[in-house]
Image (cartoon, grey):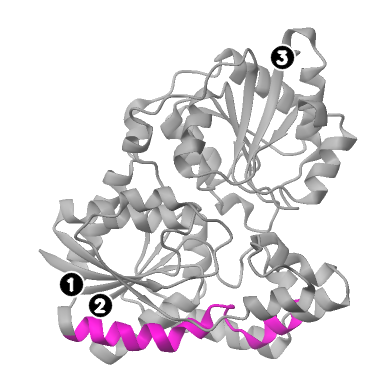
Amino acid sequence: MKTVLVVTYYWPPAGGPGVQRVLKFCRYLPQFGWRPLVLTVADGEYPAIDESLAENIAPDLAVYKTASLEPFSLYRRFIGKKKDEKITTFVLTEDSQGDLKRRLAAFIRGNLFIPDGRIGWKPFAVNQGLQIIRRHKPDVIFSTAPPMSTHLIAKTLAHKCSIPWVADFRDPWTDVFYYHNLRRTRCAQRLDHRLEVSVLRSADAVVTVSSTIQKLFQEKAENRYFVIANGFDSDDFSGVTPLPADGLRHIVHAGHLAVNQNPSAFWIALSRMTQDKAFSNVCIDFYGSIHSKVEQTLKDCGLMPKCRFFGYRPHHELVSAMKRADLLFFIVPDTSYAKGIPTSKLFDYLGAGKPILGVGPTDGDAAEILRQTNAGMMVEAGNEAGLLEAILKCFKGSYGSPSSSRISSFSRQSLTGNLAELFNNIS
């Protein structure tokens, strides 16, 4: 069995989709002849905690954790947050719109911490990584990001030890949708861009989650690029009992909603539907952080009486909620590369086997997945009439029959097999 050193910042007890991807890779790689070793951070700054994910870690998996120097404790103190208060992703990326203290904190973070606030982990991780390599002599290094600092760690280790390296991108780097909110100076932008290109050129192979992100990178640097989508683990859904019936019809959104995931036409369409007596028992359940501007739009559309907010929940509870849903929906962020955002929640939705409504580009990667699987419908964010029609079709199940074979191609096991094949080819 060959060995791969996995470098990841997000690892249980961290929650969220980034953890799911690398955690499932590590769970299934041994089935394809690869033994993972994990290099991660101890006591990381995570926007969400999910202790239940530790159940996916094999007892014999070697996990090495290191210290890290990060700015978040100072950040909390500076802007008046409590010591243990979690910082959601969109708080960090929108402080440039806030009061003077928040704008100053955002400027410092955007211009002194490049490529991101996790760069203080690098010296600790490199030191521990060299010890792991001397002891275990891995055949491949695999790093997954964000945070992009993870790739700088792997790049250093690969260069020092002459080991093949695969860089995995769950999001773009300098094209990520919140990048303009970092308020970086031209000098900081140039440095960040040079780091991005150096990683893209240095890695022996680059993996992305969508073909659109792959094309973004191909225009920056030549390399071998591969698309390995996010997926779902059928084991997460087997034996899970849906939340008890309560006489309501449930529309469910799983995950965070940021300020650029706020299409008024969709909320208006939902409001119109709920005013119909036939749908008087509909409720809209949100699991995850909701931006205050999204809440305000829900109020303006008269939807608040139909909404319930549960905040972040452990993944197994989220699965139970999805299995009870009559309709699952997701909203693609309104950004320049919106077509290339398949959104990780879509894949868990596929695993839940319930009707799916996507709000966003109808010619994007998420729309193509829905077309391939016939698991739901995709409608442009501004098409109010089309959104209302799609909601009703999904409720009635009249959009078509899902393709089980296509859906199974997005299983975590299948996708991990693709990654193992890539490892075999470069090692």
Amino acid on which disc 2 is placed: Pro
Q: Which residue occupies 75% across, 53% down? A: 259
Task: Measure how far apart labels 2 and 1 are at the Cα level.
Answer: 6 Å
What's drawn in magenta, residue-wise? Answer: 106-134
- What's the mark number on residue 427? 1
Give the answer, above or below, for where 141 lies relative to 266.
below
Mark 2–mark 1 CB contact (< 8 Å): yes
Residue found at x 36% / y 37%: 236
Question: Callout 1 environment at 10 Å: few (<14), some (14 to 19), or many (20+)?
Answer: some
SS class, disc 2: loop
Give the residue pinned by disc 2: 164
The Cα atoms of the two marked residues, 3 and 2, are separated by 56 Å
As for residue 127 lying within the magenta part, the answer is yes
Q: The residue under label 3 is which amino acid type?
A: Asn
SS under mark 3: loop
Q: Earlier in the sequence, mark 2 or mark 1?
A: 2
Q: Is residue 385 left or right of residue 117?
A: right
Instruction: Please tell me how crowded label 2 is: few (under 14), some (14-19), or many (20+) other residues with Cα within 10 Å.
Output: many
What residue does disc 3 label? 281
Q: Quadrant of residue 267?
A: top right
Instruction: Report crowding for label 3: few under 14, some 14 to 19, many 20 or more residues within 10 A (C-alpha).
Output: few
Query: Magenta span has 209?
Result: no
The residue at 55%/43% (across/down) is 313
Instruction: Give how far across and how far down residue 66 sits, in percent.
Output: 39, 79
